[in-house]
Image (tube, rainbow, N blue to C red):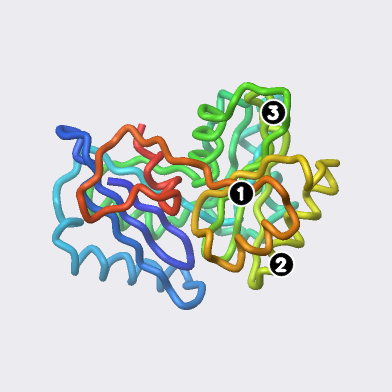
Amino acid sequence: MSIQIRLSGLSFCILNRSTNTIEFIKHVLLDKKATPFELLNELRNTVDSNTELQQTFDSIICIYQNELSCLVPNDLFDENNKADYLKFNAKILKTDYISHDNLPTINSTNVYVPLVNINNYIFETYGSFDYKHASTILLETLLQIAPNTTDRTLYINVNQSSFEIICLKNKELHFYNTFEYITKEDFIYYILFTLEQLKLNPETIKLNLIGNIKKEDELYNIVYKYVRFVEFLKPNYKYTFNHNLSNSNNNFTLLNSFS
């Protein structure tokens, strides 16, 4: 099972490895950002009210999706200084536990803040489990599937109130950042600002959309208004899906979390 944790909601996905089938996907969306305490209550209530989540699982991965993360080149990374990397671009507390993921494909380390109370609950409920930051899975997946081309390609992964922009070239990472948005104007502002900073032409750059966005959405419409080549990244999962489940890009990180 894969559990995606964010302050605005929860997502669950169950893979039956015997049949290689995705059997269960569930999203819990919250009206506003929850505190870690409120989120734990939501997680506990969701598990208690869904028999599918009360099984014994061979493995569990917890995915943390938040802005409290930072990529550090391995040459500069020192495990004793993890808080120092984060404090320049995120507000952290002295009591925060800081973890990290290794990204060998880009010779970097992803430093981030998981939620200790959530980790404790998952361990008490299911036993041992793994956890990663959502951006680790996102970057690893895109670096695997990206075309080996000298042209730079932009990927935008849309979440409920934030989105990531990733720029790749020759299967190498050239840019990654997370932005929060409320309106569609916020959304397009950060995209156009990033294009300007990277000296990318909106008339020629290829922009791939994934995540919580559809063609009829206002977010898509405003992107397509300012960027000529906009496409939805076509999912190519190695699983089959129960007839009532979707393999849409809305579950991109969740479905790519199974190693």
Q: Nearer the viewer, residue 192 or 129?
A: 192
Q: Residue at x 64, y 72 (%)?
A: 182
In this figure, which residue is indicated by the disc labeled 2?
186
In this figure, which residue is indicated by the disc labeled 3?
169
In this figure, which residue is indicated by the disc labeled 1?
156
Q: Is residue 140 left or right of residue 27?
A: right
Residue 225: x and y in percent read 72, 60
Residue that sits furthest to the bottom in the current view: 31
Q: Residue at x 50, y 45 (%)?
A: 133
Of the residues shown, which amino acid type is indicated by label 3?
Answer: Lys
Query: Between disc 1 and disc 2, whose residue precedes?
Result: 1
Q: Nearer the viewer, residue 48 or 243?
A: 243
Q: Secondary structure at mark 2?
A: helix
Q: Contact, CB < 8 Å: mark 1 with mark 3?
A: no
Q: CA distance from mark 1 to mark 2?
A: 14 Å
Q: Residue at x 61, y 49 (%)?
A: 156
Q: Secondary structure at mark 1?
A: strand
Q: Residue at x 18, y 64 (%)?
A: 50
Residue 244: x and y in percent read 22, 56
Query: Between disc 2 and disc 3, whose residue precedes?
Result: 3
Q: Secondary structure at mark 3?
A: strand
Residue 155: x and y in percent read 62, 43
| Residue 81 in sight in this render | no
Q: Is residue 26 left or right of residue 242?
A: right
